[in-house]
Each structure stands twice: as C-alpha cells, then as structure tokens.
Image (spheres, grey):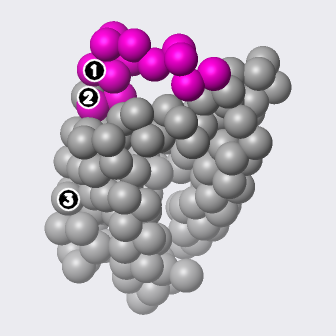
Amino acid sequence: MNTKNLFTCVAAVCLLFGITLAFMPEYIGNQYLADPAMMNPVTRMLSQSYGSSLIAIAVALGYARDSGPTFARKALVFFVLISNLALIVIHTMAILNGLETATAWLTVGMSVVFTAWSGMLLSQPENRAAVLA
C-alpha cells in the first residue's frame, strides 16, 4: 500500500473512465443514468470535457508514480483524497435522488477505497512514507 500502487490504480481507473467518457459518452449515460434520455448535446460535451480531464490526470499520475518523496507527490495524494471524497458525495446524492442507477454504487465503493488509501498514506510520518515510496 504505497503511493506508487495508489497512483497506478487511480491512473488505470481514470484512463478507463476518461477514454469512455471522451469517446463514448452515450455508453456511460446508458450505464449510469436512470433515464438515458437525459443525455443531450450539452451533457455529451460536458462528459467529453470531463473525460479529457481524467485522461490528463491519468498521465500525470503515471509520470508521478516513479518520482521520489516530494512535495508535489504528496500534493497528488492529497488531490486523490479530495477528489474521491467529492465523488462519494456527488454520486451518493445522484443515486439517492434517482438520477443514477445502482451501478454508481460501484463508483462510490471504489472512491471509498481510494479515499481511505490516500488518507492512510497522508497520515504516515514523512520518513516512513519515503520508505514506502
């Protein structure tokens, strides 16, 4: 459970969702939206924009996974923590309000794991985190 493994896992998930959102937003809409008819040109464009951001995050995490214990690496772990906390809240609210299907609970579960993992890494003392890097 080190930052290299965290960055690799998060990068893989970001790349998978990023490519799908950027190039096949209707597929994600059919899987996640309770009413796929809500997908319109605006939501398609927003999905593609978010997908391209996820691809960029995957590339950044991919490059950072082999870096040493730096402030930038710690900032990326903090980014993973905060972004996954936000995903937990957003998807939970969307599911409970009937906007997303139960499939989104898998995303919530995955985000809980990434949040706990990054929180555990951030709570370690600096010298121990450097050994685990």
Indicate which label's residue lies in the foreground, 3 or 1. 1
Q: Position of residue 26 (x, y in %)?
A: 40, 34
Q: Write down the quadrant of residue 96 in the picture.
A: top right
Question: Which numbered tag is attached to residue 80?
Answer: none
**Mark 3 crowdedness (10 Å alpha carbons): few <14, some 14-19, many ≥20:** some
Secondary structure state at the residue bearing disc 2 = helix
> Could you tell me which residue is drawn at 46 percent across and 51 percent down?
80
Asked whether residue 11 is drawn in magenta, I would say no
Image side of residue 120 versus residue 43, left or right? right
Crowd around label 2: few <14 · some 14–19 · many ≥20 (10 Å): some
Q: Which residue is mark 3?
A: 59
| Quarter the N terminus occupies | bottom right
Give the residue type at disc 2. Answer: Ser
The alpha-carbon separation of the residues under discs 2 and 1 comes to: 6 Å
Residue corresponding to mark 1: 45
CB atoms of marks 2 and 1 within 8 Å: yes
In which quadrant of the rendered view does residue 5 lie? Answer: bottom left
Quadrant where the C terminus is found in the figure: bottom left
Q: Tell me, yes or no, whether the highlighted magenta stretch contains residue 38.
A: yes
Number of numbered discs: 3
Q: Which residues are magenta?
A: 35-48
Q: Which residue is mark 2?
A: 49
Q: Regarding mark 3 in the picture, which secondary structure is present there? A: helix
The one nearer the camera, 48 or 84, is 48
Q: Nearer the viewer, residue 112 or 51?
A: 51
Amino acid type for the residue under numbered disc 3: Val
